[in-house]
Image (tube, rainbow, N blue to C red):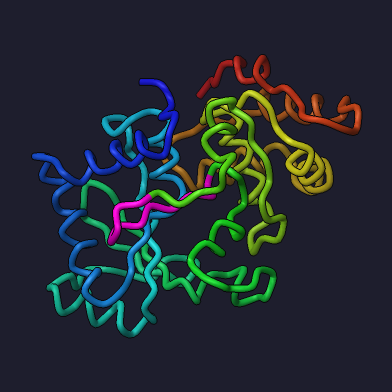
Amino acid sequence: MSTAKTTKALKQRVERFFVSNNAGRNEVNDILSSLTNVADIYIFGGMIRDICLYGVKKFDSDIDVICTCDRNSLVNALLFNNINVFSENKFGGIRIKQLEWDIDIWCVRDTWAFKKGYIPFVNINSILSTTLMTWDSILYDFNRKQVICDDDYLKDLMLGRLELVLDKTPNEIGSIVRILRAIYGKDAISIGEKVINMLKNRIGKYSIDELVQYEINSYSKRYLNSARVESLISLLKNYIGYGDLSVEKYKQLSLDI
């Protein structure tokens, strides 16, 4: 399936995920619907990106959710709806497991970039400025059934152009690995100047083994190996200093596991 070319087409794809005979999807829909009684609910980043790129049937990752209520209200709403098996995830959100898809839920005001003052919170659209990469900078308004993204989002996704949004991060090695995984695992064709400069400035702080091992420890699906990381480092060293950088041919290196 090709990339959704309009927000209308993307909206239809996301709605097909929730309006389904699939029991797992219905379970996710029921949980999110129960929370709309206390907050506005938004699906954030990876789920919307992957459905846009590959369609509903191939989506097999976690579901990241943002809510507009505070943490106590969120916990109380979960308990009220008999959702009592959950835990705290590593960034202070709530993770619901034991489903076909894990769900991570954050309260919008607890977003790291807002709390640290790097990005001012004005409204829910401010979330788009808190992501690491442009491809994560998208929301689906679950209450109102709307896609929220910048004008260039779909164009960049269709072109395979990946750019940095926010270079501040609570997890530097994690952010590097996420970018490398996007390059090798999400059909990136080119990367922009901000991504290039971020990688050039930071990737040398870590050994190749550290980067590969971080992915092994953090993700069930692997995209990195020594050859791929070495290839990208070499490419960055030869960067001419301006403009986008093509990474397409470097993605073809095999992943020997």
Question: Against 51, is 164 above or below?
Answer: below
For the point 29% across and 34% down, the residue is: 56
For the N terminus, the image quarter is: top left
8 or 84, which lies in front?
A: 8
Horizontal and vertical percent for residue 121?
58, 73
Horizontal and vertical percent for residue 137?
54, 50
Question: Against 158, is 41 above or below?
Answer: below
112 or 37, which lies in front?
A: 37
Q: Is residue 215 magenta?
A: no
For the point 21% across and 52% down, the residue is: 99
Horizontal and vertical percent for residue 113?
62, 68
Give, as a single range, the part of the protein colored magenta. Answer: 136-146
In which quarter of the view is residue 236 placed? top right
Question: Against 204, is 256 above or below?
Answer: above
Report the number of numbered marks.
Answer: 0
Q: Is residue 236 left or right of residue 226?
A: right
For the point 50% across and 75% down, the residue is: 110
For the point 35% across and 57% down, the residue is: 141
Q: Residue furthest bottom?
A: 72
Q: Is residue 159 left or right of residue 83?
A: right
Q: Is residue 142 magenta?
A: yes
In which quarter of the view is residue 162 placed? top right
Horizontal and vertical percent for residue 225?
61, 28
